Amino acid sequence: MTVNDYTAKLDQPLREIAEKLQALIDAAMPQPGAVWHGHPVWSLGGAPGKTPVAFFKAYKNYVTFGLWRGQEVEDPSGRLTAASRQMAVVKLQGAEEIDAELFASWIEAARALEA
């Protein structure tokens, strides 16, 4: 399964959220995403999940966007919420909740942590 396959299977409004996230992450990462452990993940290493940076995962009523080392990313907006290990996430119920500039800055910061 590809990231496009994963996204295409989602119902609206989750599909719209996933498509917007996919475009943002693809633009910020040097390698395309891959489905790893059942959801899209973008990594810097040579294989899915090797040096992971960002992901999203759809649930019944929302999509979670996350960064593996997100707790280390500066977030003056306060929107990133601490998750397990060093991860930080944002739960999205509509594509309008995605601030492209803010999310791109988070992804760039998370990517820089792994460089």
Image (tube, rainbow, N blue to C red):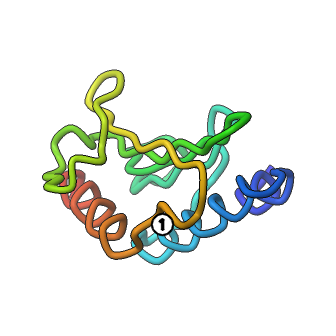
Q: Position of residue 67 (x, y in %)?
A: 36, 45
Horizontally, residue 36 falls left or right of residue 96, namely: right
Secondary element at tag 1: helix
Q: Position of residue 107 (x, y in %)?
A: 33, 61
The residue positioned 30% from the left and 44% from the top of the image is 80
Q: Which residue is mark 1?
A: 25
The residue positioned 61% from the left and 49% from the top of the image is 40
The residue positioned 56% from the left and 73% from the top of the image is 23
- Return the residue nearer the eye: 98 or 30: 98
| Amino acid type, residue under disc 1 in the picture | Ile
Q: Position of residue 95 (x, y in %)?
A: 58, 64
Q: Is 105 situated above or below 65? A: below
- Return the residue nearer the eye: 70 or 29: 70
Q: Position of residue 3 (x, y in %)?
A: 70, 57
- Return the residue nearer the eye: 84 or 78: 78
Q: Is 96 situated above or below 10? A: below
Could you tell me which quadrant the C terminus lies in? bottom left
The residue positioned 49% from the left and 42% from the top of the image is 91
- Return the residue nearer the eye: 1 or 12: 12
In which image quadrant can residue 85 be found? Answer: top left
Horizontally, residue 30 falls left or right of residue 18, namely: left
